[in-house]
Amino acid sequence: MAFFQEHRVGLRVTSLALILFGIGTGVADGKPFFFIVFTIPGVLLGFYLFLSNSKTNRPNNNSNGVDELIKWNQLKESGAISNEEYEKKKSEILG
């Protein structure tokens, strides 16, 4: 997985080149062999890159909520906000 993340731009270009080459040679020359051999791997590579990229870029909402609760708890403990304000914000964060 690290290889794909490090070389994602080059792999995207390769995927697009495979797709375009397969469509250009396969459809224009009437040779379905080139279309199958180049286009399908290009599409699969692009799809894999899309899926792996979307998994790694998702923010972790759970840790953000925990950090937010810790911040509000510290404000409550220091006396900056009341217990009621803390409870209200806590219920908002937890949903």
Image: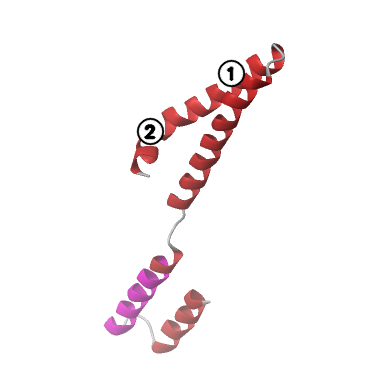
Magenta span main SS: helix
**How crowded is the residue under tag 1: few (<14 C-alpha within 10 Å), some, or many (20+)?**
some
- The first of marks 1 and 2 along the sequence is 2
Amino acid on which disc 1 is placed: Phe
Which label is found at residue 21?
A: 1
Q: Which residue lies furthest to the left in this view?
A: 78
Residue 11 placed where, x, y %? 45, 30
Which label is found at residue 7?
A: 2
Q: What element carries label 2?
A: loop
Left/right placement of residue 34 relative to residue 70 reads right
Q: Residue furthest front?
A: 33
Instruction: Give the residues in magenta.
Output: 64-78
Spatial separation of the CA atoms under disc 1 and disc 2: 21 Å
Residue at figure coordinates x 70%, y 17% from the top left? 27
Residue at figure coordinates x 40%, y 66% from the top left? 64
In the image, residue 11 above or below residue 61? above
In the image, residue 57 above or below residue 60? above
